[in-house]
Image (tube, rainbow, N blue to C red):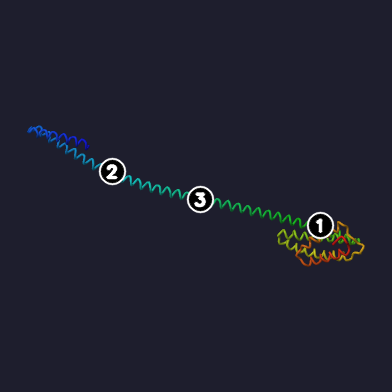
Amino acid sequence: MKRILFILALLLLTIIGYCYSNETKNPLVLTKITELENRLNLLQSKNDSLNKQIIIYKVKEDFYACALSDQSTKYSLITGSLLALLALISYASFKYEINKIKKDFELKICKHVETDKKIIDKHNEGLARSYVNGGNSNQIVKESLENKNDLIGASYYNLFATYNHYLASKEFLNSNAEDNVRIAESEMKLVKNLLGETLDIIERLNSDNSYSHEQSLNFRKWLDKMAMSNDESIKDLIAKLRVNMVKRTSIIG
């Protein structure tokens, strides 16, 4: 547009210069010149109007660009907040599931431990009762042999019964049941009584009486095991048994 105006102005100036240089007074020429001036002014006015519209468009463009930038920023902020909230919810849900799995696992472990404990307690109790039965059987054999005046056999089976009841007491304690603890204490009292009976039988032995090698080894093993008791009265009885048995045989020492 500026180039067109420049060219028209240049033509107008050329025509005017030409007319004045020739001192032409033609009204037709003057009229043309006037028309060209009016057209030039009109074009100038349109050019100014177009420039104003361009400025308005630029202002609108800047406004929309700024508004779009603000909207984009808000959208990014909202999107980021939603993603952060989603991540927080996901983490909380994941942590909840982990804690739930952990609690379920701990509960199952506790149940398994409790079940295993019950099985072990039943096993220990069953083993203890088998020792009790063995001790009772050996006591019956002891009484039979004592009636036959077989003091060697009677003392052997009486000490064997004592050892059985000692083991029964230990297994009852391992079962951790309140009733079994009471039974274990009762068994340990029986152990003391049977040790005293064994000592009485050995003191009644003649100098000619002697134990076999196998009997002597079992005596030593049983006494060594029972000597590990924390009961001092049991330890004292075992010490007396050792002394009396050494007097009556060279095998036991």
Secondary element type, mark 2: helix
Q: CA distance from mark 3 to mark 1?
A: 63 Å
Residue in the foreground of this view, choosing between 129 and 236 = 236
**Observer able to see residue 140:** no
Secondary element type, mark 3: helix
**Observer able to see residue 3:** yes
The residue type indicated by label 1 comes to Gly
Residue in the picture at 28% in, 43% down: 58
Q: Which residue is label 2 attached to?
A: 58
Q: Are marks 3 and 1 in contact (CB under 8 Å)?
A: no
Q: How many marks?
A: 3
Nearer to us of marks 2 and 3 is 2
Q: CA distance from mark 2 to mark 3?
A: 48 Å
The mark that comes first in sequence, 2 or 3, is 2
Please tell me whether residue 241 is drawn above or below residue 79 in the rendered image: below
Q: Is residue 198 left or right of residue 80?
A: right
Q: Is residue 235 left or right of residue 23?
A: right
Residue in the picture at 21% in, 36% down: 3
Q: Position of residue 10 (x, y in %)?
A: 17, 35
The mark that comes first in sequence, 3 or 1, is 3
Q: Which residue is label 1 attached to?
A: 134
Residue 182 - label: none
Residue in the foreground of this view, choosing between 237 and 239 = 239
Please tell me whether residue 202 is drawn above or below residue 105 in the rendered image: below
